Image (spheres, rainbow, N blue to C red):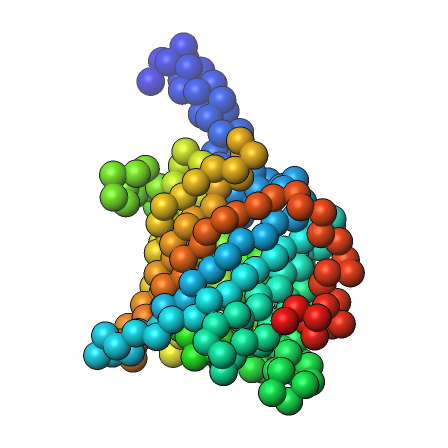
Amino acid sequence: MNLQLSNFVLAAALAATPLLASAQTPEEKGLEIAKEADSRDLGWGDAETDLEMILRNKNGDESLREMRSKALEVKDDGDKSMIVFDQPRDVRGTALLTFSHTTGNDDQWLYLPALKRVKRIASTNKSGPFMGSEFAFEDLGSQEVEEYTYKYLRDDTLDGKEVFVIERYPTDENSGYTKQIVWMDKAEYRPWKTEFYDRKQSLLKTLTFHDYKQYLDDYWRPHRMEMVNHQTGKSTTLKFSDYEFQVGLDERDFDQAALKRAR
């Protein structure tokens, strides 16, 4: 190799070195995608919506529950939310209050009108089913970025949409999941599918999101979510309607006294 060619090769190698050094790891890229998705959903303030919950057993038999939900965005912490059951009569007035947190475990309380008392959900019980559905208590928080570590897996397509596929791992040692795999579209960073793996690393459930609509020109919300339990054959559908944003909710709407007033 002559001196001129040798110098060219050396210069090219040195020029490439910073690029190699700055290349993202799968963990860094996964975290970056999660942060971007979170940043696109900041600033909505507060919201209310009506819900229908449809429970199906493995034979396809259905039961219907009617609920309403409200949520409050909290600066420098996770969101607060409350779900209240209106129908059927035997669960009317049952309410779940959730304080999501960016660090530490989420706080959750369940009001049981038949007993007229508020029950705190222990962190060791958050992997249990919520009101007989295929959603666990831990599924009902705001899924803060800091509650997981991440790993980018690949680019893919899902139902014709270009998506990122990332893995996320709960930091809560009491989580019922070892990992979740999330399909998120590149255009708007909306989740379209999540697979949940149990403590034995087996596929437990799949959640799919449908019928997204945009509110306040910024915020996307699904109007239907389908959770399928692959191990039991049961499934739960959540249907959302009548979304309203910035209705004037505040901290007083999300304390334990509000649980008892919710009915």
**Which residue is at 43% across, 70% downward?**
65
Find the residue positioned furthest to the front: 89
**Which residue is at 47% across, 60% downward?**
51
On the image, the x and y values in percent for residue 213 come to 43, 40
- Locate residue 256 relative to residue 91 in the image: left or right: right
Task: From this view, report whether residue 93 is shown above or below residue 209.
Answer: below
Find the residue positioned furthest to the top: 4
On the image, the x and y values in percent for residue 152 come to 43, 48
**Which residue is at 76% across, 72% downward?**
257
Q: Foreground residue, 214 or 94?
A: 94
Task: From this view, report whether residue 204 is shown above or below residue 119.
Answer: above
Tell me the quarter of the image containing the N terminus. top left
On the image, the x and y values in percent for residue 34 come to 52, 47
**Which residue is at 61% across, 44% downward?**
245
Tell me the quarter of the image containing the C terminus. bottom right
Task: From this view, report whether residue 133 is shown above or below residue 219.
Answer: below
The image quarter containing residue 201 is bottom left
On the image, the x and y values in percent for residue 164 come to 38, 43
Does residue 146 appear in this view? no
Q: Foreground residue, 136 or 189?
A: 136
